[in-house]
Image (spheres, rainbow, N blue to C red):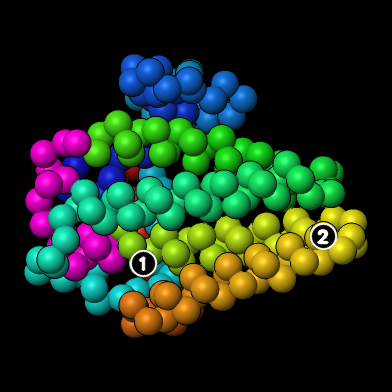
Amino acid sequence: MEKPIYREFTGKEYHDYYESVGIAPDKKTGDSSIGYSKNFNQEVLGIIGEIPYIYDKKIEDNSFTKKTRRENIIHDIIRLENLKKYVSNIMSTADLNKNSIFYELFQYVVIQWEKILQTRKKYLEKDEYAKMATVSQEFSTIVIPNFRQSLLLGELRRLLIESPKTPQNTKLIEDVENEIAERIEFVKKNSEIKTFPIRKLIQLQLGFLLLSLKYF
């Protein structure tokens, strides 16, 4: 497949992949509607029309930076390991509302982080990662994760808000807000993110739908 069309892997394919590289697969998570449908018909074709909500011109910049892809990925791995440790500590020591959907979310997220980290470390020595990173690749590896982590930490904050109002939780809410602010500030300093008008997003969705219908 060619850009910007990418393959969506099924839950079974993820499961088989993890087994093949020696990582214990998650046996509790269900599959997508596409993966489920393939149990009945292997010829099923599912199409997901992703639309961008934000944009930065750096994603088109293919000039080279002064760091290799491996250096950037190691930096990102360290950041993710620190975040995993931070979240795991809160999950194991704080008095949390275990009936909250966010509690279930973070139980799942911590497990997935471990698999992601194992996979990235396993393939870090590939020759392709010794190449110099482009501005686009560095942006995707260094800046974008900070943006995503700030959103995830926002959900951790909501979990704490929904939990008992203990002095520890009050302090943790403040700590999480500082973690979010730190990441947002990093993104602001290293990006010129712009949002798309709602009208254009709707036009993109409708256009994709009409284009899809042409082939059915």
Q: Is residue 215 visible?
A: yes
Q: Is residue 161 depicted above or below 122 in this figure?
A: below
Q: Look at mark 2 in the image and give the residue it sits on.
A: 168
Q: Main secondary structure of the magenta part?
A: helix
Residue at 53%, 53% in the rendered image:
83
Q: Is residue 41 depicted above or below 70 in this figure?
A: above
In this view, the residue in front, 174 or 16, is 174
Residue 94 part of the magenta-drawn span:
no
Residue 129 part of the magenta-drawn span:
yes
Q: Position of residue 75 (x, y in %)?
A: 33, 55
Residue 195: mark in rendering = none
In this view, the residue in front, 82 or 96, is 82
Q: Is residue 21 depicted above or below 127 in this figure?
A: above
Residue ranking furthest to the right: 165
| Quadrant holding the N terminus | top left
Image quarter for residue 9?
Answer: top left
Residue 143: mark in rendering = 1
Work out whether mark 2 precedes mark 1 in sequence or the reverse, and give the earlier one. Answer: 1
Q: Is residue 196 visible?
A: no
Label 2 environment density (alpha carbons within 10 Å; few <14, some 14–19, many ≥20): few
Q: Position of residue 92 (x, y in %)?
A: 73, 41
Image quarter for residue 59?
Answer: bottom left
Residues rendered magenta in the picture? 125-140
| Quadrant holding the C terminus | top left
